[in-house]
Image (cartoon, rainbow, N blue to C red):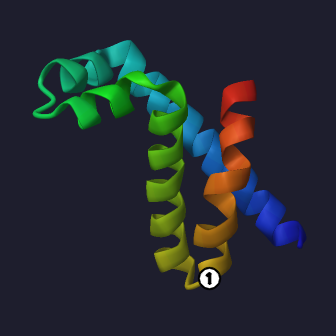
Amino acid sequence: MLDIICWIAVVALAAAFVLAACSKSGVLNWAQMHAKSDIIYNALCCNFCATWWTCLLIAVVLALCCWDYRIALCAPMASIVAVRLW
């Protein structure tokens, strides 16, 4: 159980870093301006959606690297709250 909590913290910190870096460097604004559809544009404008997809991508990559499916199942849902707090 403690290892899943540690993975949730790792996913949350990595997602917070990625979102902050994309926001500061202008990548997020560039992606919003060049979005091909309204759904992608709205998903990039929504903080919750951007956080969810970032956490999911990081969790799936970690799950594939560590061969532990529990990371991909638990970490995105639990780490969204932590990302918004940091």
In the displayed structure, does residue 42 sit left or right of residue 80?
A: left
Indicate whether 43 appears above or below 28: below
Q: Quadrant of the C terminus?
A: top right
Q: Nearer the viewer, residue 49 or 4?
A: 49
Q: Residue 44, image x and y in percent?
A: 35, 29
Task: Name the residue located 55 percent from the left edge and 33 percent from the top edge.
Answer: 48
Lateral position of residue 7 relative to residue 66, left or right: right
Residue placed most toward the observer, 34 or 86 = 34
The residue drawn where x is 62% and y is 51% is: 11
- Give the residue displayed 40% in from the left and 14% down from the top: 24
Q: Residue furthest front?
A: 38
- Tell me how many marks there are: 1
Residue 19 appears in view? yes
Q: Is residue 23 above or below residue 38?
A: above
Side of 54 relative to 2 (left or right): left
Task: Please give the name of the residue rendered at 56% of the width and 43% of the height, measured from the top-left corner.
Answer: 14
SS state under label 1: loop
Q: Quadrant of the N terminus?
A: bottom right
Residue at the bottom extreme?
67
Q: Position of residue 20 (x, y in %)?
A: 49, 23
Residue 17, position in %: x, y? 53, 33
Query: Is disc 1 surrounded by few (<14), some (14 to 19) or many (20+) residues within 10 Å?
Result: few
Where on the picture, by quarter, is residue 25?
Answer: top left
The amino acid beneath tag 1 is Asp
Q: Residue furthest right?
A: 2
Q: Is residue 86 visible?
A: no
The answer to whether 76 is drawn above or below residue 19 in the figure is below
The residue carrying mark 1 is: 68
